[in-house]
Image (cartoon, helix red, strand yellow):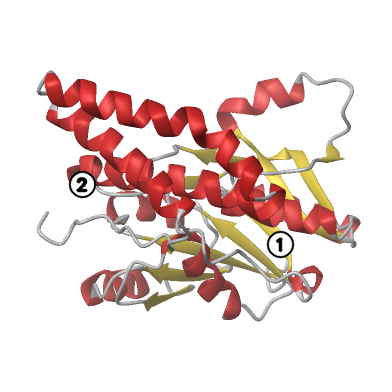
Amino acid sequence: MSYDKITVVINTFNSEDKIYQCLDSIASEIKVIIIENSNNLNFKKKLENKYSNVDCYLTGTNLGYAKGNNLGLSKVKSKYAFVLNPDATLEENTISRLIVSAENISDFAIIGPAKQDEYSTVDANTDKEQIFQVDTLKGFAMLMNLREFKEIGFFDENFFIYLEEIDLCKRVKQKNKKIYLDKKVIVNHIGGSSHNELINFEMELSRNWHWMWSTFYFNKKHFGYTYALLSVSKKFFSSIFKFTFYSLFFNKEKKEIYKQRFLGLFNSIIGKKSWYRPNVKNI
């Protein structure tokens, strides 16, 4: 099979402990574009020396999921782009089955694979065909038919992490374009592990801040400010209560987590951008 119709796009940030497993699972004939959210020249050299099919671009700063993937997608010259998380690995026939499905369904916008640990659940649904339409897909692996995105654009770069793929799927469906899940295509995904373990707590703070920021922003964007405010009100007051509770009981880690949850929501409510970045420079 010819693989010139597809390019894999991987957005990385401190992912050196995972990216090699991912790349080892991708056939060497397949073009891979890596967007590394740092200025780590040694990382770039190691990747490009080890894998002849890889081009690694350093951003010099942490762009996040949406902007990083958009940069990678802007460099794709093939018909299809396969956006893949660095903590995912492919089965031997994953790419070939994706290409077959893509060629058989010419009017698709996105095709998503079955996640390995969810495969039995999907396969057990006897009411579904092998390939069937869905409203949303998880962002760890998405095959994109690039011609279908000319009027839509790619990911909304206001998101740093969280809900950007749901937002994209929603915009795709609003334009009456088609999203499919293919049960025969398997991608193994660890989830929440695409960074070094040494920075886990700082990343946990970042995840909490951005989850809350993105939740309000997503609801405001699609349903209006009042709806968004009502939808997060319980989370808002809960974060204040739990921050106070853990402050009184001297649980520093929990206190910091709920502080970031409050701040993420507060910043989104008052219209500030998703500015928070994990502080990993000295780790």
Q: Which residue is mark 2?
A: 199
Q: Earlier in the sequence, mark 1 or mark 2?
A: 1
Q: Quadrant of the N terminus?
A: bottom right
Label 2, residues with CA under 10 Å away: few <14, some 14-19, many ≥20: some
Q: Position of residue 145 (x, y in %)?
A: 76, 65
Give the residue drawn at x 32%, y 48%.
206
Label 1, residues with CA under 10 Å away: few <14, some 14-19, many ≥20: many
**Up/down of 118 relative to 13, above or below:** above
Q: Which residue type carries mark 2?
A: Ile
Front disc: 1 or 2: 2
Residue 70 quadrant: bottom right
Q: Is residue 193 visible?
A: no
Q: For residue 144, which numbered disc appears in the image?
A: 1
Q: Position of residue 250 (x, y in %)?
A: 9, 23
Q: For residue 80, which numbered disc appears in the image?
A: none
Q: Position of residue 249 (x, y in %)?
A: 12, 18
Q: Which residue type carries mark 1?
A: Met
Which of these two is toward me, 227 or 255? 227
**C-alpha gap between disc 1 and disc 2:** 31 Å
- Element on which disc 1 rests: strand
Q: Are marks 1 and 2 in contact (CB under 8 Å)?
A: no
Left or right relative to 228: residue 145: right
